[in-house]
Amino acid sequence: MNSRAELVIDLTAVTGNYRRIAGFTAPCIPLPVVKADAYCLGAKRIGRALSDAGAPLLLVATLEEALELREAGLPVQIVGGILPHEIRTAVEAGVVCPVNDLQLARLISAEAEALGRKACIDIQIDTGMGRDGIRCAEADAVIRAIRKLPGLDCRGIYSHFPGALPEFKEYTHAQIASFKALLARVEPGFQFMHFGGSDGIGNFPEIHQAPFTHCRTGLALYGLGSSAKILGLTPAVSLRATLAQVRELPGGANVGYNFTHCLGGDCRVGTVALGYADGLPLALSNRGEVVIRGRRCRILGRISMDYVNVDLSGLPEAAPGDEVICLGDGIAVDDWAAAKGTHPHEILCSLGRRLSRRYLT
């Protein structure tokens, strides 16, 4: 390893996971979500690999993300939102635009007409997420009005779950039912009809059965989340750092900020070149572990911005320069998420820019 710390992304595992998901959902086609730079893992590299593996379209949240992938020659759709001042650029670039109300559709129509071209749109329906989209109860009339606007190719329609885990099944089934009822009334002409994300694929098979033509997946691509367990997907992300220093400290010595750890006896202490600025959760202070030379070593004291101390007792051969496995080898993203009281998406999105990225192909 030539860097202080590196994030290793196994593209073979990512594409293998995509193909396994596609086999599970067939004939419904999964669409990869690569927003937020593919959860900080590298949207262009991952997007290219997924496109080569058969993904027909990549989904992002913002215009900037879409333009980056379009410049790389990749097909892309915005499934978040688009702002009025972004419309002309999006239409010029051939980005599939989301429509979450009639006024936005009118603005896109006007820009498309002014540019002398068709704008491809997908209509977003709010079936209970409560965040954005056309409310399902009002959607029939709004969709009819949108379809009458010039310059628009009303290609798709989609919705999203606020929770797609078994404990939310009553609410989720009601969402699916209301969306399917809407599709039965307005479906003719839509080529893309999709609902939910990675959790929904494994927990609610209805979303990859007729009338749905496509489904969405993000976290499961990396072997994470509830569907990863159901489908037997492969973890694709590991994090490795470097042992920077090894010292013998006496009993009673403080380790780290804020005096959260005092050594109970003489101890061999290692300093690892990784901290919370790199995404190591502060919540792992005094409780997390890393792996050095095949052995688990406990984190000592409060994690710093740039470093973390670990207990090297019983590991006399450890030396500066040793590789330190922080994610992988039995230490999972889910472990970090549980310690932090959050979900794997946040863990991945917190992985710092200082980490070098290495891709296995």
Image: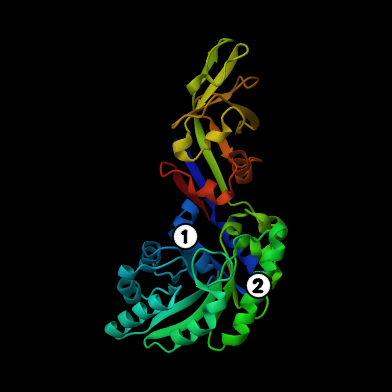
Work out whether residue 275 can be spotted. yes
Q: Is residue 66 left or right of residue 279?
A: left
For disc 2, the neighbor class at 10 Å (few under 14, some 14 to 19, many from 20) is many
Q: Quadrant of residue 169?
A: bottom right
Q: Secondary structure at mark 1?
A: helix
Q: Is residue 104 left or right of residue 215?
A: left
Q: For the image shown, how many numbered marks are present on the structure?
A: 2
Who's the residue at 41% across and 41% down the image?
A: 354
**Visible residue check, residue 26:** no
Label at residue 259: none
SS state under label 2: helix
Q: Which residue is mark 1?
A: 35
- Residue drawn at x 70%, y 67% is 204
Which label was assigned to residue 176?
A: 2
Q: Quick one: 57 or 138, which is closer to the camera?
A: 138
Q: As shown in the figure, which amino acid type bears the numbered disc 1?
A: Lys
Q: Quadrant of residue 186?
A: bottom right
Measured along the vertical axis of the image, is residue 112 above or below residue 247? below
Task: Give whichever of discs 1 and 2 has the lower sequence position.
Answer: 1
**Depth check, front residue: 208 or 168:** 168
In the depicted structure, whether residue 11 falls above or below residue 126: above
State the image coordinates of residue 212 (x, y, percent, origin top left): 62, 77
Q: Are marks 1 and 2 in contact (CB under 8 Å)?
A: no
Alpha carbon of mark 1 to alpha carbon of mark 2: how far?
A: 24 Å
- Name the amino acid type tagged 2: Ile
Identify which residue is drawn at 56% across, 45% down.
238
Q: Is residue 346 above or below residue 146?
A: above
Apparent side of residue 218 relative to residue 203 in the rendered image (left or right): left
